[in-house]
Every structure is written in structure tokens, then in C-alpha cells.
């Protein structure tokens, strides 16, 4: 049994098994971006995952 209480190193939320030690694809991308030079977004990466990336920016009502 896997009783690992892994937490997303990016946002601190419970990690999803689908994304290893991350909670979402987005956080995994963020971490990946850090490895590639501290850049948030990866050049050439299509932003069509529908992961609610823009929803966060629009959350200013
Ligand atoms: Zn996260």
C-alpha cells in the first residue's frame, strides 16, 4: 500500500498520482519551467490544455 502523503511542491495541494509529485499538469509544467531556466511558460508549448490557466487571471471580480 502506498501511504505517501505527497504534496505538490508548487502549490502545496495533495499530489495526484497522475502527475507524480504534482497536483496538476499545470504545476508540473511550472516545475519543469524552473528546471529550464526559471521560466514560467515553456516556449513552443501549446496553451490549449483547457486547464483553467486563464481562469486564474480572470478571478478578479
Ligand atoms: Zn500544485
Image: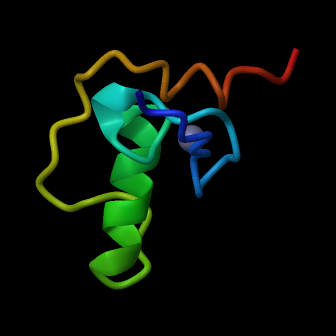
* Residue appearing at x 70%, y 46% in the figure: 12
Residue 27: image location, x then y, percent: 47, 45
Q: Nearer the viewer, residue 56 or 25?
A: 25
Q: Nearer the viewer, residue 40 or 11?
A: 11
Residue 56: image location, x then y, percent: 65, 27
Q: Nearer the viewer, residue 1 or 27?
A: 1
Q: Is residue 10 left or right of residue 40?
A: right
* Colour mapping: rainbow
Q: Nearer the viewer, residue 39 or 28?
A: 28
| Ligand 1 image position (quadrant) | top right
Q: Is residue 28 left or right of residue 4?
A: left
**Looking at the figure, which quarter contains the C terminus?**
top right
**Looking at the figure, which quarter contains the N terminus?**
top left
Q: How many numbered marks, from 0 up?
A: 0
* Residue appearing at x 33%, y 78% in the figure: 35
Residue 43: image location, x then y, percent: 19, 61
Q: Residue furthest left?
A: 44
* Residue appearing at x 67%, y 36% in the figure: 13
Q: Is residue 47 left or right of residue 45?
A: right
Residue 2: image location, x then y, percent: 43, 33
Q: Residue furthest bottom?
A: 37
- Height in image: 7 above or below 17? below
- Height in image: 40 above or below 15? below
* Residue appearing at x 66%, y 31% in the figure: 57
Q: Residue furthest front?
A: 1
Q: Quadrant of residue 31?
A: bottom left
- Height in image: 51 above or below 6? above
Amino acid at each position: 500500500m502506498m501511504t505517501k502523503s505527497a504534496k505538490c511542491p508548487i502549490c502545496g495541494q495533495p499530489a495526484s498520482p497522475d502527475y507524480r509529485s504534482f497536483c496538476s499538469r499545470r504545476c508540473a509544467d511550472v516545475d519543469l519551467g524552473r528546471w529550464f531556466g526559471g521560466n514560467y511558460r515553456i516556449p513552443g508549448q501549446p496553451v490549449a490544455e483547457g486547464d483553467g490557466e486563464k481562469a486564474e487571471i480572470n478571478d478578479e471580480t
